[in-house]
């Protein structure tokens, strides 16, 4: 079985089991706390606000629908059919369109670019969940989508998130209920060094235009009632003349 096949099957199992409704999974926080905060960082760098916006790794489409309220053409793309079923069910008005896409598959992003033209890309927390063998190919796919005029916004867990996750997983009562299925399906976040992401982007021909740190908000809470946030880093990338 290939690396990508294992990855796809893990996500299919996760999303088939996941409850419907916004906020039911660990990372599905309210858009005002996630994509809304990210857009304030992303939009100043866009060359063309009217380009298609691809939400890569869209899951159940919570952030996709938020983006669709603000951009004229938004495509939610995911490797999991079950995830897209959730997204379409939650979007009966068809605010966005949804596409089955393996972003790490050779040629898949180029095929989508041939259909859409240059696009802006929003990707939250996908690279660190991908197998190490697939990460450069995934970033190469992002580069193919943005091409000359698009921009990409990536937000990924930082190295400082690892001890937080380990602490949650090893707590006396076990991991929090919304985090447990992530580990159970074998899609626990992997390690991506903070300084590796700019290298992936540079190899793909993209330049980091801006970067910073911002907590990644989750839907889970600690016993004391405080919301769990994970350290993360964000980057805006694109091609420069």
Image (cartoon, rainbow, N blue to C red):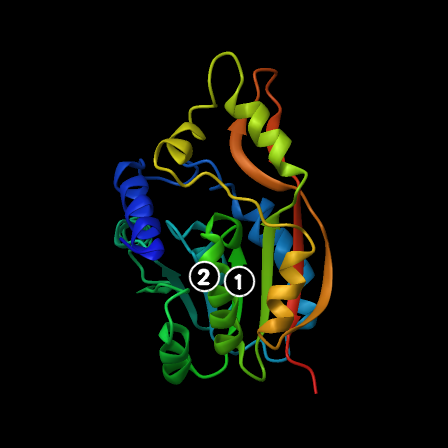
Q: Which numbered marker is on residue 122?
A: 1
The percent coordinates of residue 73 (x first, y second) are 43, 72
| Mark found first going from the N terminus, 2 or 1 | 2
Q: Is 178 in front, or is 106?
A: 106
Number of other residues with Cα within 10 Å of mark 2, as a class: few under 14, some 14 to 19, many 20 or more = many
The percent coordinates of residue 89 (x first, y second) are 27, 50
Number of other residues with Cα within 10 Å of mark 1, as a class: few under 14, some 14 to 19, many 20 or more = many
Q: Is residue 197 left or right of residue 65?
A: right
Q: Is 202 in front, or is 36?
A: 202
Residue in the image at 47% along x and 64% along y: 138
Q: Is residue 149 above or below residue 78?
A: below
Q: Disc 2 on helix, strand or loop?
A: strand
Quarter where residue 159 is shown: top right
Q: Which residue is mark 2?
A: 56
Image marks 2 and 1: residues in contact by CB distance under 8 Å: yes
Residue found at the far bottom of this picture: 241
Q: Is residue 19 above or below residue 4?
A: above
Quarter where residue 224 is shown: top right
User: Mark 2 to mark 1: distance in Å?
Assistant: 6 Å
Residue in the image at 41% along x and 64% along y: 104
């Amino acid at each position: 079985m290939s690396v990508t096949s294992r990855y796809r099957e893990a996500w299919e199992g996760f999303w088939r089991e996941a409850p419907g409704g916004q906020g039911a999974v660990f990372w599905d926080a309210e858009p005002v706390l996630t994509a809304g905060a990210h857009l304030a960082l992303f939009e100043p760098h866009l060359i063309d606000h009217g380009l298609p916006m691809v939400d890569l790794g869209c899951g159940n489409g919570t952030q996709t629908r938020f983006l669709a309220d603000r951009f004229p053409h938004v495509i939610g793309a995911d490797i999991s059919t079950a995830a897209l079923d959730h997204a379409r069910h939650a979007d009966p008005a068809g605010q966005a369109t949804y596409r089955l896409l393996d972003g790490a598959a050779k040629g898949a992003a180029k095929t989508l670019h041939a259909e859409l033209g240059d696009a802006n890309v929003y990707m939250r927390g996908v690279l660190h969940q991908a197998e190490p063998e697939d990460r450069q190919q995934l970033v190469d796919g992002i580069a193919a989508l943005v091409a000359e005029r698009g921009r990409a916004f990536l937000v990924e867990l930082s190295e400082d998130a690892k001890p937080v996750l380990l602490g949650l997983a090893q707590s006396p009562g076990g991991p929090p209920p919304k985090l447990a299925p992530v580990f159970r399906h074998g899609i626990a976040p992997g390690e991506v060094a903070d300084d590796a992401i700019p290298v992936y982007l540079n190899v793909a021909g993209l330049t980091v235009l801006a970067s910073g740190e911002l907590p990644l908000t989750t839907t889970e809470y600690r016993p004391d009632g405080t919301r769990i946030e994970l350290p993360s880093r964000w980057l805006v990338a694109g091609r420069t003349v």
